[in-house]
Image: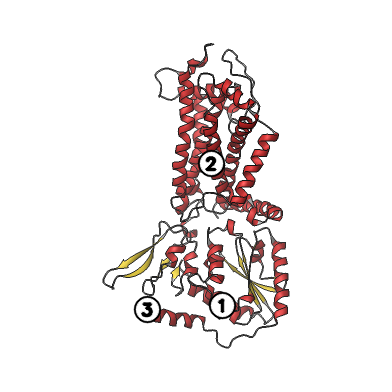
Amino acid sequence: MHLSRPVEAGIRRLLSRVDAAVNRLYGWEGNPLYQSGTIAAALLLIVTVTGIYLLFFYRLGDPYASIARITDQWWGGRWIRGLHRYASDAAVVAILVHAIRLYAQGRSWGPRALAWVSGVSLLALVMICGWTGYVMIWDVQGQLLAQEGARLLDRLPIFSEPISRAFVSEAALPSAFFFLNLFLHVALPIGLGLVLWLHVTRVARPVLLPPKRLAWVITGALTALALVRPVVMEPRADLASLHAQATLDLFYSFWLPAAMSLSPDAVWALTLIAWVVPALVPWWARPRAAERPPASVVDERHCTGCEQCYLDCPYEAIAMLSLPGEGQRMVARVDPSLCVSCGLCTGSCAPMRVGPPARTGRDQLAQVKSFTAGEAPSADAIVIVACQRGAGGITAAAGLDGAKVYPVECVGNLHTSSIEYLVRSGVQGVLIVSCPPRDCWTREGVAWMEQRLYHEREAELQARVDRRRIRVVHAAAGEHVEVRHALAAFRAELGAMGQTEAEADVSVQRACDTELTTSGSS
């Protein structure tokens, strides 16, 4: 087993408990842990907007006095400065939570490596931006940060004269120093925007901001914190003081005491390690070659050119190409270097000819037939189609409270023909238990599944299937009790409907073949 697998599993167990607790309080729709990436982007937007406002009152000639005037302005300055600082701190937390979740879910390697490395770089830029922001205040904390920064930069072959000499004189620092620091503080957010674009460049339909309601709640909570606990001014920087005492920011200055006690070489070495080790996660945490799932493939002989797999792919790994010499017939083709083997294209293909090897719709249908033959569910039985990554962790058992459990990798790559077969084979009902949509490991799997079941998205569930006997619920890995409650409620509803009768010949695959033949000959 790969050494990182137990670590990932341990973090997942911890997250499942935390997710279940937060879901009980806010529901999965309002769980901020599921939105950590978009929350980080929203917080950076708040920081940018409030920072632009504060810039209008900042003076290079006397930075400390200008910040003091801002802090004294209760209505138009103090709470905005507090919101700026608290949003900056919260952004670091959100980025770290986002990274931990992605690592625990194994979504950091392969085609996702670019997003991971750019995310690590994004965090580094945020830390540097916060560093320059605290220096701009020019209080005792800003002085310590500036002096330590000068000491570290002097170790690099950049400046002809040591810049740390500027801090050994009792004379005031020139305005050029503050101008350079201000320039960096303003220019770095532009770099953040570019890195953020790179971060999502390989994702189809990226979501950059959280739902409006959650965004306003977070903004309101931080604003309330800024009003209730306003940011206070630390003592002014004093270059004549050799032992300045400062209150250090937990998120941006925590490293300062340790760094000041080490040599510049040691600090640079530790800084490099702190960036390189996380940046190399896509390489040291990826599964061994034999354990990596294969990319999807397309049976081009039977591809109808409907474009649905191309539209549904969350990583833009599928392209539509025109085959030469065949009347410009369009077919789908997978780029293996971009495919993460999520299998969502499997559920998108009506002819069931797309997907990772042994995981196409036809393979799934054969597995469902084998399941019903082996389990022989009775007419009053319920089959729970459960996501292996969520669903309260019930896939470890063959049954739950008298219901049969049919585990799937993701409900998003489950072909609707498999659901149709279960319903028409005579079971009382099919309960589909997915991950919460905002925490779907395949990003859009739950959304596409619901669209195919109820809104006639391509490869839709056929009209002949009684949808009253199908129920979709969402449950995280730690929500075992919620799955039991959903099963009991579904069983009560089905009991009022009466039993169903199995069809003598459930010809799901032959019906699909007929549709395919007709489409190909038109």
- 459 sits left or right of 90 in the view: left
Q: In the displayed structure, does residue 26 sit left or right of residue 111?
A: right
The amino acid sitting under disc 3 is: Gly
Query: Which residue is drawn at the image coordinates 56% and 54% (left, top)?
Result: 105
Q: Which of marks 3 and 2 is nearer the N terminus?
A: 2
**What's under tag 2, amino acid-wise?**
Leu
- Within 10 Å of disc 1 (Cα), the crowding (few <14, some 14-19, many 20+) is many
Between marks 3 and 2 in the image, the one whose residue lies nearer the viewer: 2
Q: Return the residue at label 2.
A: 45
Residue 218, percent across and down?
63, 44
Q: Which residue lies furthest to the left in this view?
A: 325
Query: Is disc 3 placed on a helix, strand or loop?
Result: helix
Which residue is situated farthest in the front direction here?
A: 75
Above or below, comparing residue 27 to residue 469 in the picture:
above
Q: How crowded is mark 3: few (under 14 residues within 10 Å), some or many (20 or more)?
A: few
Spatial CA span between label 1 and label 2:
46 Å
Disc 3/disc 2 C-alpha distance (Å): 51 Å
Label 3, on which residue? 520
Question: Residue at position x 67%, y 31% from top?
Answer: 230
Percent coordinates x, y for residue 21 in the rendering: 70, 53
Q: Residue 420 carries which label?
A: 1
Label 2: which secondary element: helix
Disc 1 on helix, strand or loop? helix
Q: Distance between the residues labelled 1 and 3?
A: 24 Å
Left or right for 521, reference 360: left
Which amino acid type is shown beneath numbered disc 1?
Glu
**Res 143 seen here:** no
